[in-house]
C-alpha cells in the first residue's frame, strides 16, 4: 500500500551497446565490492556478524527455556523487545548520521548490536531479572542492526553508480546472508559439545570481533 503511494519516477540506467551476460554482471558486482574499501569492509564484517548472530539464534530458545527456565509467555515478550529495538533504531539512524556522520554511525551501531548479543549469556538471578537482562540485549541488538542497515544501505547508494546498484546489492546478500546457515550449524555443534551458554558467549565474541573490524580509518573518515 505504501509503495503504491510513492510518486517519484526513477530513470532506469541502461547501456544499449552493452550485451547482457549474467556471469559478466556477477563479476562486475563482485569487483565493484572488492575494489572499494568501504564496501568490502561492510560486506566482510556483515558476513562475520550474520554468522555470529546465527550461532546465538540457533540456541537462544533452548538456552532460555531449558537452562534459565523462562516461561513461554516471558520469552515471547523478550522477543517482542527486538521489534521495539528495530523501531527505535530506525528513528535514531538519521539523527545519528547528521550528528556523527555515516562512518562513525556504522561503527557505533555495530558496537551497540554486538553489546546486545553479549548480554544473553550473562543473564542470572530471578526469572524477572534474567528476562530484563535478555530484553535489554534484544533492545540493543535491534537498535544497532536497524541503524547499521539504514546507514550502510545509504552509504552504498551514495558511492555505487546507479547502474550497478542491483549487482552490488546481490553481491552483498549472497556473501553476507550465505553465512547464516553456517552460523546455525556452528551453533548446534558448539552448543551440543560445549554447552548452550558457551555457544552464546562464542557468538557474542564473534559479534564484537565483527564490530571491531569496522574500527578503521576508512569508516571514521567517511562523514
Image (cartoon, helix red, strand yellow):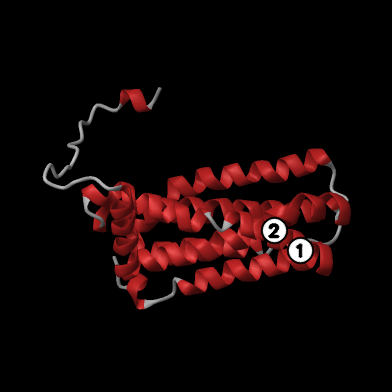
Given contact means CB atoms under 8 Å apart, are the residues at marks 2 and 1 in contact? yes
**Residue 213 visible somewhere in the drawing:** yes
Q: Position of residue 185 (x, y in %)?
A: 69, 58
Give the camera-side residue of 157 and 82: 157
In this rendering, the answer to whether 102 lies above or below 62 is below
**Mark 1 neighbour class, 10 Å CA radius: few under 14, some 14 to 19, many 20 or more:** some
Q: CA distance from mark 2 to mark 1?
A: 6 Å
In this rendering, the answer to whether 121 lies above or below 79 is below
Residue 189: mark in rendering: 1
Quarter of the image holding residue 36? bottom left
Please give the name of the residue rendered at 85% of the width and 60% of the height, measured from the top-left corner: 125
Left of 79 or right of it: where is 154?
left
The residue wearing badge 2 is 185
Q: Position of residue 24 (x, y in %)?
A: 28, 54
Please give the name of the residue rendered at 37% of the width and 50% of the height, measured from the top-left corner: 169
Left of 223 or right of it: where is 110?
right
Label 2 secondary element: helix
Give the camera-side residue of 166 and 68: 166
Q: Position of residue 204 (x, y in %)?
A: 65, 66
Please give the name of the residue rendered at 69% of the width and 69% of the height, measured from the top-left corner: 202
Amino acid at each position: 500500500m505504501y509503495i503504491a503511494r510513492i510518486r517519484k519516477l526513477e530513470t532506469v540506467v541502461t547501456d544499449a551497446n552493452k550485451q547482457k551476460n549474467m556471469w559478466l554482471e556477477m563479476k562486475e558486482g563482485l569487483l565493484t565490492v572488492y575494489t572499494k574499501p568501504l564496501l568490502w569492509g561492510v560486506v566482510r564484517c556483515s558476513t562475520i556478524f550474520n554468522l555470529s548472530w546465527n550461532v546465538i539464534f540457533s540456541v537462544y530458545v533452548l538456552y532460555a527455556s531449558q537452562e534459565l527456565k523462562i516461561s513461554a509467555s516471558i520469552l515471547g515478550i523478550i522477543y517482542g523487545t527486538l521489534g521495539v529495538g528495530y523501531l527505535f533504531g530506525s528513528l535514531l539512524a538519521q539523527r545519528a548520521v547528521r550528528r556523527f556522520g555515516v562512518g562513525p554511525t556504522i561503527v557505533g551501531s555495530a558496537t551497540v548490536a554486538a553489546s546486545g548479543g553479549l548480554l544473553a549469556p550473562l543473564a542470572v538471578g530471578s526469572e524477572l531479572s534474567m528476562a530484563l537482562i535478555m530484553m535489554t540485549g534484544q533492545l540493543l541488538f535491534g537498535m544497532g542492526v536497524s541503524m547499521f542497515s539504514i546507514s550502510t544501505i545509504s552509504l552504498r547508494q551514495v558511492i555505487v553508480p546507479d547502474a550497478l546498484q542491483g549487482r552490488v546489492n546481490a553481491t552483498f546478500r549472497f556473501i553476507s546472508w550465505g553465512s547464516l546457515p553456517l552460523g546455525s550449524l556452528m551453533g548446534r555443534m558448539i552448543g551440543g559439545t560445549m554447552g548452550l551458554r558457551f555457544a552464546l558467549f562464542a557468538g557474542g565474541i564473534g559479534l564484537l570481533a565483527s564490530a571491531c573490524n569496522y574500527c578503521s580509518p576508512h569508516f571514521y573518515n567517511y562523514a
